[in-house]
Structures are given as C-alpha cells and as structure tokens.
Image: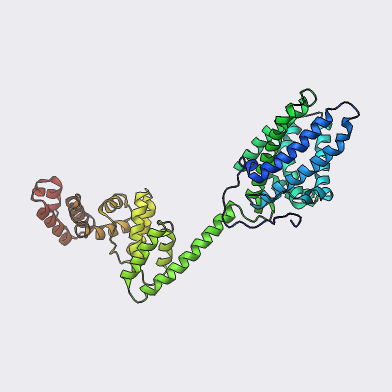
Amino acid sequence: MGHWNRKAKSVDHWEPLHIFRFPFYMENILVIVLFSFMFILACLWAKLPAGMGIRSVSFWILSITLFFNYAFVIVEHTSRGLQHIPKLSSNLAQQLHDVRLYLIAILTIFYLSAYWEFDKDPAFLVFAFITYPLAFSLLVISRTWASLLNPVRLFKSLIIFVFSIQSLHFFAIQLVVGSLLFYELQVFFEVSGWHVFWAVPLTLISLFVLFRALGVLLNHHGERLGIPVLQNAESHQAAVAEGKRRELDDFVAKLYRHVRVHNYKKAWAEVEEHLQETNYINVDDLFVRLCEWDDKKVASRLGSELIGRLVKNNEFDRALRVFRECCEMSDGNLRLPNGSVTLILVERARDPTLKRYMYNTLQYFDKDFPNHPSTLKVFLMVAEMALKNYDDKETGALFLQKARDYESTVTEQEAYKSLSGLI
C-alpha cells in the first residue's frame, strides 16, 4: 500500500500471529491513545446540552472514518501474515475516498434493515453473526462487490471461513466484543461522563483484538479464500521443508563422493556427524535417499540406526519394514544396534521372510553383543528355529553346543532336552 510510511515486507521468520498481545505493541498503544482521545472528546461533546452537542456529529464521522481506515489496515496486513502493522500516518486522514468505507456502510445498512425486516428474529441474528464478518472481510480485501456476487464462490468461502479452530476463536471474540458494544450503546446516555474515560479505551482495545482475530482467520485460510498471503503457518512450513530438502541434497552429494571410492569409514563418520548436528530430524529422508544408490552399504548401516530409534518410539511395524528392507539390501547380513532391539523384533516378527532374516541375524548375536544377559536364551532360540522351522540339524547342533559351553547346567533344562531329542 503506497500511502503508508512503511511498506509491508515479507517476513523471513514466521511466528504465530498474536491476537491478545496485539493491542499492546508500542505502535498500537500510541494509536489507541490517539483514538481514545478523539472518541472521548466526541462522547463528551455529544453529552453537551441540545444545540451545543450537535456539532459533534461531523467529528464523530471523522473519528469513525479514521478508525475504520485503520481497522482495514489491521485486517488486510494481518491476513497477509504480518506480525506488525504499518505505522499510522498523516495520509490516513485523506482516505475518505476509500471505496471500502462506503461498501462497508452499505453492507451494514443492509444487514440492519434485514434484521428489522425479520422483526429481530434470533435466527437472522445468528445468520448475520456468521456471515457478516466474511462479507466484511471479502470487501476489505478485494475492495469490490464482485467477491459477493458469485453465490457458488461465496458459499465455498463461507464453509472454509466457518469450520476451523481459528473460526471458533474468532466467533468467541466477536461474541464478547459484540456484547460489550451492545451494552455501551444501551447505557451511553445514562451513565456519567467519567464512564467514557475507561470504557472508550477498553472498547478500542477489544475492537483491535476483534479485527486482529479476523485477520488471523483470513491468514490461516488465505490461499483457499483467494487472498494473496505473503506467509502463514503452512507456507512457512513448506519453506522450511524446502530448505531442509536442499540442505539434505547438498549433504547427500558430499557423502556420495566418499561412497563412490568405497571410503565407507569416512562416509559413515560424515553420517554420524550429520545426524548429531540435526538431532536425527531427517534420518528418515536420508535413509530413503541412500536406498536409491546402487551401493547400499551405508544405507544398510543407517537403517540399523533407524530401526533402533523406531523401536525406542514403539513404532514396531515400521521398524520391521525397515529391517526387512535392510536385510534385502545386505543379503540378510544386517547387524542391529543392540541386543534388546534384536529380541523385541524377534518377538514381533510374524512374516516367514522376516523370521528367516531374524534367524540369520540371531546367529551372530553372541559376536555382536558379547556378555548380553540373554545370550543363552538366544542360543536355544536359534537351535529351536533351526530344528523345528528350517530342518537345519547342523546349525541346531552347533547352537546346542554353544549353549552347553556357555552354561553347563543348561542340559538339565526341559527345552534343551527337547531340542536334543530332535537331532
């Protein structure tokens, strides 16, 4: 908007648009103080004896015009995604030609007339409560009636406008502020002049909150409502995701230079450093990218780390899927990160292919995890799988021997005796 001293700029860093803190930004406090002075003066002027107060009408019109011009700015700039609104300038007083003032006035008269025509029907009051803010918003943003003349688009906009958490917040605020304004109008000529000294600032603060909440609602649904949003939570997340994707692209390209010359030790050191720096935030994406390479050694090792994290987060089904994929990449020679993860996956593996991969993995358990407390249990488990599932008597006999060597008293256990009988 060229008539502002400070042009709106796209924000590089997104933070949620504040609603209740908004009136208390320093620039807004100054604006509220200015409008409070103007409206207090107009109120006191209106309370003067007949004939003297009539001159306040023109001052009321000026004050309301200036205030609504700034309200338009609050709604419009907030809907774009700006945390702070451009400063109030002297040019604002020259905005009497802003067509939105007349459009909003006509819209308001139309709703009031319909309200009286329907004999103050509560159903129409609910209808107006929901639809008036949307019509107000479309006029403020588009500056033309055209946005209200397409019934299909208007109906779609209404659905988008109403059904969201932000909508609930806005309508709750609108209810409170509307009740406050209704009360103030009812008692305006009945209370003392001192009442306006606290009621006017409170009302203005409430209206700032209301217009800000409307702008936040429009910002949230901006793209779906056809509003050219500079930035909102969704676009910020998309920008962050794109930035992370580019960073990952650069890292993968750097990693590939080591893998293509089979420098796996250096490549894995780079992976570990990257995961520590990023707090494992993109380990899933990195794994997917590495799986695309012909040389899958680094991908397989990273998959093992990923399995450990998935098991820690109780994502067992996904851990088994990654386990299976890694086994296929490494011809069944996958080494899991620790013994506990291995035993958890063994218990949850149901698919015959997964069981076969687990059978191969368990045969290296004592080498991968020396002195693990479940080593004897694993020896008997491998022997049982070999003899009962795969008719592999040689492997069965080997692991029964390992069990005897590990603990001689195992021969007294029923499980050992049962397995020995199968050989």
Nearest the camera: 39 or 78?
Answer: 39
Nearest the camera: 205 or 334?
Answer: 205
Q: Quadrant of residue 393?
A: bottom left
The x, y position of residue 411, in whole percent, is 9, 49
Q: Is residue 150 visible?
A: no
Please name the residue shown 75% across and 37% down the image.
37
Q: Is residue 335 left or right of residue 243?
A: left
Nearest the camera: 88 or 72?
Answer: 88
Q: Is residue 223 visible?
A: yes
Label total for image: 0
Q: Is residue 283 left or right of residue 191?
A: left
Q: Residue furthest bottom?
A: 261
Q: Quadrant of residue 132?
A: top right
Question: How are the colours assigned in the image?
Answer: rainbow
Please state, as top left, top right, bottom left or bottom right, where the N terminus lies in the image: bottom right
Please state, as top left, top right, bottom left or bottom right, where the C terminus lies in the image: bottom left
The x, y position of residue 394, in whole percent, is 15, 62
Nearest the camera: 2 or 289?
Answer: 2
The x, y position of residue 157, in whole percent, is 70, 47
Q: Is residue 298 left or right of residue 106?
A: left
Q: Residue furthest right?
A: 51
The x, y position of residue 192, in whole percent, is 76, 23
Is residue 51 shown above or below 334?
Answer: above
